[in-house]
DNA sequence: TCCCTTGTTGTCCAAATGGATAACAAAGCT
DNA sequence: AGCTTTGTTATCCATTTGGACAACAAGGGA
């Protein structure tokens, strides 16, 4: 029998592929509806399968959202490591501090509120946050080593700038009182002042390297 | 007949009183379970009534949580205004920037994530955020007028310090990577640097005036 | 005191959700 | 080709939730 287009709908996907689709769809749904708003049936619909199938891959709804968050954490970390290498210190710093995409940050804001009620999520959040601070610390040290700026305590500066970036992201993504240019201006300005860079050093980095984010399921 | 203890359970509360109880209980529940996790039945149980009664005061669940959030915003704003008056500039600044209570901030973090899906909540959040920035701007201007510090652009400094405070609050309340002393130290340090205060000026304010928060239903 | 307003309860209902299970079908192995 | 594994579907179920409604009872005004 010919392998017609109509046959594709019965084509079975490999286990890994399907699992990946489900996780990605879940993550996208988390960004739109929040952790508490994710529904097995909605995930299934998005993937194009019956909701019972999800049970075949994940023992429970909690396990599913945990897997989705883990995926977000690791894929982000992966792209972050990639960002670090192969960029001059100032570009790396600017790229790290620049505003991240909408759905990207929504997941984190949701994670902040859900962490209090979901211990495994809290653990993953803690891990991710420390990783972020550590990465920024390294970037700061590179800037200092290159003689482009100064920092008496890179770890402390990293913590402060992380707070600024998060707070600005809230103003930008959640509250919506500032736009992306203004958000970047505030964060860049704070970093320049804190690290004794020449004013405008970060704003001049162009184009600002964009931090990665998970891709929507590519097969749909 | 005597007004015995047993009679109290049949005592009918005034409309305003009951409504207030419901709103307060809802707000407490929002802090613990998040906006999406609030259930009419749970609110009713906490207040000690049947869940159907809530419908008598609020047309829908959405209206209830909106009312609860409005209450949080206004009661906070009220206590904030009170904080402003009758305090010297530095104490006001320190009191404003100091870490706020746990359940207090949980509501805001939840609001950040829910605002994207609940327009009225987004509106209230926007209003509140601007109020907060304006209040801090005023405090900064008082500090400058008193000759205790400097600010080229109080509104911009207010925005930055608000971001720092929010970001630090996330690290403290949601992620839990820092304690309350460390949180205050970071925010105070940032403010001292940004406003050219003498180092330690804010940390020396003692006792730091505590910002108010809504009270749990007092009748229970 | 009678009555009307309204705070309050108890109960019912349809919809949605997470989970369980049995039948089925596509792959892969021998 | 037969058989086992496992991806997949179609249903079923118990539970929870927001909402609707009728009956009741406490207060307050005439």
Image (spheres, coloured by chain):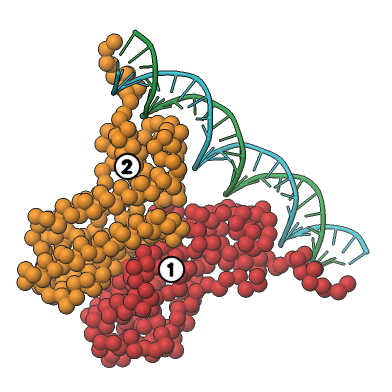
Chain colours: A orange, B red, C cyan, D green
Residue B176 lies, in percent from the top left, at 37, 67
Disc number for residue A214: none
Q: Quadrant of the C terminus of chain B?
A: bottom right
Give the class, few, some or many, for how many residues have Cα within 10 Å of label 1's Cα (few <14, many ≥20). Answer: many
Q: Position of residue A142 (x, y in %)?
A: 11, 66
Q: Secondary structure at mark 1?
A: helix
Residue for point 31% across, 83% down = B141
- Residue that appears at 15% across and 64% down: A139
- Please name the residue that numbered disc 1 is placed on: B105
Closer to the camera, A199 or A83?
A83
Q: Residue A183's quadrant in the figure? A: bottom left
Visible residue check, residue B193: yes
Q: Secondary structure at mark 2?
A: helix
Q: Is residue A153 left or right of residue B118?
A: left
Residue B205 image offset from top left, x and y in percent: 36, 88
Vertical position of residue B20 compared to residue B89: above or below: above
Front residue of D4/A204: it is: D4
Mark 2 is surrounded, within 10 Å at the Cα level, by few (under 14), some (14 to 19) or many (20 or more) other residues, namely many
- Report the quarter where the N terminus of chain B lies: bottom right
- Residue at left offset 75%, top offset 66%: B9
As measured in the structure, the alpha-carbon distance from the residue carrying label 2 to the one carrying label 1 is 30 Å
For mark 1, name the chain.
Answer: B
Q: Quadrant of residue A61?
A: top left
Residue position marked by numbered label 2 in the rendering: A24
Circle 2 chain:
A
* Residue located at (46% from left, 58% from top): A117
**Image height of D15 relative to A6, above or below:** below
Circles 2 and 1, Cβ within 8 Å, touching? The answer is: no
Q: Residue furthest left?
A: A147
């Amino acid at each position: 029998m010919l392998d017609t287009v109509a046959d594709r709908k019965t084509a079975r996907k490999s286990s890994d592929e399907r699992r990946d689709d489900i996780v990605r769809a879940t993550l996208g749904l988390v960004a739109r509806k929040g952790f508490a708003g994710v529904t097995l049936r909605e995930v299934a619909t998005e993937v194009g399968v019956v909701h019972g199938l999800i049970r075949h891959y994940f023992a429970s709804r909690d396990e599913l959202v945990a897997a989705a968050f883990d995926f977000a954490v690791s894929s982000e970390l992966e792209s972050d490591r990639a960002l670090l290498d192969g960029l001059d210190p100032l570009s790396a710093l600017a790229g790290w501090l620049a505003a991240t995409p909408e759905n990207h940050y929504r997941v984190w804001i949701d994670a902040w509120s859900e962490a209090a009620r979901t211990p495994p999520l809290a653990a993953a959040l803690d891990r991710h946050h420390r990783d972020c601070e550590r990465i920024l610390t390294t970037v700061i040290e590179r800037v200092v080593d290159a003689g482009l700026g100064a920092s008496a305590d890179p770890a402390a500066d990293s913590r402060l700038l992380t707070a600024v970036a998060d707070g600005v992201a809230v103003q930008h993504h959640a509250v919506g009182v500032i736009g992306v240019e203004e958000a970047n201006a505030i964060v860049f300005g704070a970093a320049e002042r804190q690290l004794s860079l020449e004013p405008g050093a970060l704003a001049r980095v162009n184009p600002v390297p964009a931090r990665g984010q998970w891709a929507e399921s590519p097969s749909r």
